[in-house]
């Protein structure tokens, strides 16, 4: 609905929550989440916990960040 505006910051937000990124910064500093996108990410994560790989990421995070 937003012509993919905010998709990269949205992906970065998930990776930030998992500890893989320190922030959701993009090459274009004006690029950020679309209005309401953080809430939508929260909603989708609540509705579909079986699609998340947080436990897998947490189990391997130290190994990957060496």
Image: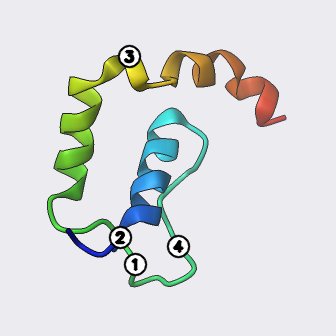
Q: Which residue is drawn at 20% across and 68% down?
A: 1
Nearest to N terminus: mark 4 or mark 2: 2
Residue 9 to residue 56: above or below: below
Residue 60 to residue 4: above or below: above
Pointers 4 and 1 in contact (C-beta within 8 Å) = yes
Q: Residue at x 29, y 24 (%)?
A: 48
| C-alpha span from label 3 to label 4 | 28 Å
Look at mark 1 in the image and give the residue it sits on: 31
Residue 59 lies left or right of residue 7; in this view the side is: right
Q: In which quarter of the image is residue 41?
A: top left
Look at mark 3 in the image and give the residue it sits on: 50
| Mark 4 secondary-structure assignment | loop
Mark 4 or 2, closer to the camera: 2
Label 4 packing within 10 angstroms: few (<14), some (14-19), many (20+): few
Look at mark 4 in the image and give the residue it sits on: 26
Look at mark 2 in the image and give the residue it sits on: 4
| C-alpha span from label 3 to label 2 | 24 Å
Nearest to N terminus: mark 3 or mark 4: 4
């Amino acid at each position: 609905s937003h012509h993919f505006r905010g998709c990269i910051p949205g992906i970065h937000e998930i990776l930030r929550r998992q500890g893989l990124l320190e922030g959701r910064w993009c090459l274009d500093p004006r690029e950020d989440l679309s209005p309401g996108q953080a809430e939508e990410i929260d909603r989708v994560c609540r509705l579909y916990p079986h699609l998340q790989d947080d436990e897998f990421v947490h189990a391997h995070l130290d190994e990957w960040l060496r």
